[in-house]
Amino acid sequence: MKFLIPILMIFYVSSGFTQAQKVDTGYTYLGLPDGAKARLGKSTIAWGNSIALSPDGTQLAVATTIGVWIYDTDTSKELALLTGHTDTVTSVAFSTDGKILATGSADTTIRLWDTGTGKHEVTLTGHVGGITLLQFLPDEETLASGSYDDTIRLWDLKTRQLKATLGGHTGGVHSITFAQDGGMLASNGWQKNMLWDAKTGERLGTFRVELPDKIERFNRFGRVISGALSPDASILVSWHIKQGIRLWDTKTGKRITDLNLKERTGFNTVALSPDGKTLASERKENEIQLWDVNTRKPQTTLTDQMGRVSMTLFSPKGDILVSQSSTDYRFQQIWFWDIKKEQPKANFSWQTRSIYSPIFSDDGNTFAAHNGDQIKVWDVQTGQLKTIFTGHSEMGRSVQYLPDGKTLVSRTYSKVFLLDVKTGKPRITIRESNYPTFSPNGKMYATRPYKQPIQVWNTETATLKMTLPGTATEEYRYLTFSPDSRLLASYSEKDKKIFVCDLLSRTITHTITLQTGGARNVIFLPNRKTLATLSTSWTVQLWDLITGELKDMLTKETEKITSMMLSPSGDILAGVGDDGRVPLWDTETGVLHSTLKFDDGFITDINFSPDGKTLVSNGGQDDNSTLLWDVATGTIRTTFAGDIRHLWLAQFSPDGNVLVSFDEERKSILMWNMKTGSLSATFTNNANRIESFSISRDGKTLASGHEDGTILFWDLTKYSK
């Protein structure tokens, strides 16, 4: 049983992608949307039932935000990326014969795939909430699905039709287990377990555990009751982190007994052996307790653990118990226990905070788990690590090409990467908390570490160029370079001052004390003699950098300016007023050049073309009119045929012929022809929202950062002419 491996012939003709590229890269090419030519990052792994091993353990399916990755665990190769869901894939499962892969998504649908061809066979619809789990029944004829719509649905694999809907849970269905013959199933959810006839869909019993409101009131999963059904379906085992282990008689619905220890009354992890005779739970630090289900008494204690036990799982044959423990939240230990010998068979260290989705292959020879970034696969028989699959960590939500054409800056919530465009791999990593700002020439970046002086670094070598004296404060709100990268302005919220440093002399040459409160924006004018500021009182001022004195107040406090922008040539400073006017000032004289005013409503957002001769704006009564203005005359040239939003994030191609924006849902990139005012192309990525994009300096490639941390590269060659 093998997935069909796509045969790809890829040719690269734009910046960063050369023909017949043979270097080792971080790019992936499977499952790309139309128009995309490469991807960085394989997207975030989902939680819950997010990985599945084929019955023989040779293949691994991984549910992510963009689709399902299929890996070969023997060769460590990517076999396929299955796409088609319109939201995050949340659950995956192989059929017992390995011929079908089922995938469930937050889009409420289930897809069945032929593992021999890699083709999508059918989409099962009916759930009205995201899918939480998928599991094939032992009869090999039925697929069970759980959902946040509080139902379990049973699907006939032959007819691909719905057989039964099992309802009654609240807060979603979180796990299900089956009797050995598949005739009965138990489901676990919010404060209760339920027992069902898997053939008729009849509810046979409800086993409720009442929890006080104060218990885990802010954690919905703290109220989830976990459970397992014995192979003969005679006993239901339930457990909770506060209420302990309980055994229930499935025929009478009565509680048989509670299993508790002096050391603890609640259990975070409990595992039932496949033969139903043994339970495993944590006991205390460094210990696992084995229970005899028949006698209801503690049996053997497994010791020699490292710290708190947070996971136990029996292999399908019941001869191996896997456990996870930790002494430090950043360091996990995985143990393989030989149940007969009651001693460790092997153990592995994993430098990670948490481990998720532990799973065995059906033959019990392969074990896998993930930590959100990596998936590790072990050979259970030899106790050796088989392979590690990487690339699922965030590559960036915000992207920016540097002028050298060789570097792409990508930002995540915690890090900033300087990526080599040729290989897609990070050259330099910076902490996001240092707030790096890049110079216009791309050769430097400045950081403002907390309570440390401002630092200026070399982009190429990541070496510290200089530390600015007298800037060790946590109050610096932002940094701004002059257009020629010679000066650096830093604004101090505490002092209401702007400090200007000459990077050649490495000294603070000018200090500007703001007279009207704080600053919302600071812009250097091209002559390096003047600084423009937008104050917290919404006024625009020009400051003399030689004397540090106020040169001119361009607006009054009654004329509120909400944003300002400098034209590419630097000769025009544009502001957007809260009354919808756009004043244009001559930066050399400070004289008002003209004022743009749209008779049919407000102007809300603006952007200049690369040559500075054209200004594009949003406006209208409903903020849905996009206009092109002649900067020289202040008159409207044309009205765009479509609706363009978020102009402060839109970008022009280097030749100014194309304006790139994205739609309201941020899943499509829109290419607008500046000459005709019409939409010329749409790039759509159904999987997740677009957070930002950047066009390469040669205009041939567009990089887009997405909410799941992946970066897509789109071919603009046909639009850059």
Image (tube, helix red, strand yellow):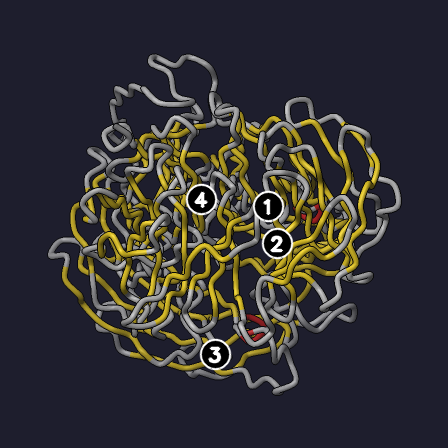
Compare marks 3 and 4 and give the one earlier in the sequence. 3
Compare marks 1 and 2 and give the one earlier in the sequence. 2
Asked if marks 1 and 3 touch (Cβ < 8 Å), the reply is no
Asked if marks 3 and 4 touch (Cβ < 8 Å), the reply is no
Asked if marks 1 and 2 touch (Cβ < 8 Å), the reply is yes
> What residue would you read off at disc 2?
311
Compare marks 2 and 4 and give the one earlier in the sequence. 2
> What residue would you read off at disc 4?
705
In this rendering, the label closer to the viewer, 4 or 1? 4
Compare marks 4 and 1 and give the one earlier in the sequence. 1
Element class at badge 1 = strand
Left or right of residue 548, residue 377 in this image: left
> What residue would you read off at disc 3?
192
Q: Quadrant of the N terminus?
A: top left
Q: Is residue 347 visible?
A: no
Q: Quadrant of the C terminus?
A: top left
The three-letter amino acid code for the residue at tag 1 is: Val
Q: Is residue 558 visible?
A: yes
For label 2, count other residues whose C-alpha is less than 10 Å away and answer few (under 14), some (14-19) or many (20+): many
Marks 3 and 4, how far apart in space? 42 Å
Q: Image quadrant of residue 59?
A: top left
* Residue 87 against residue 443 in the figure, above or below: below
> What residue would you read off at disc 1?
322
Marks 2 and 4, how far apart in space? 35 Å
- State the residue at coordinates (24%, 65%): 154
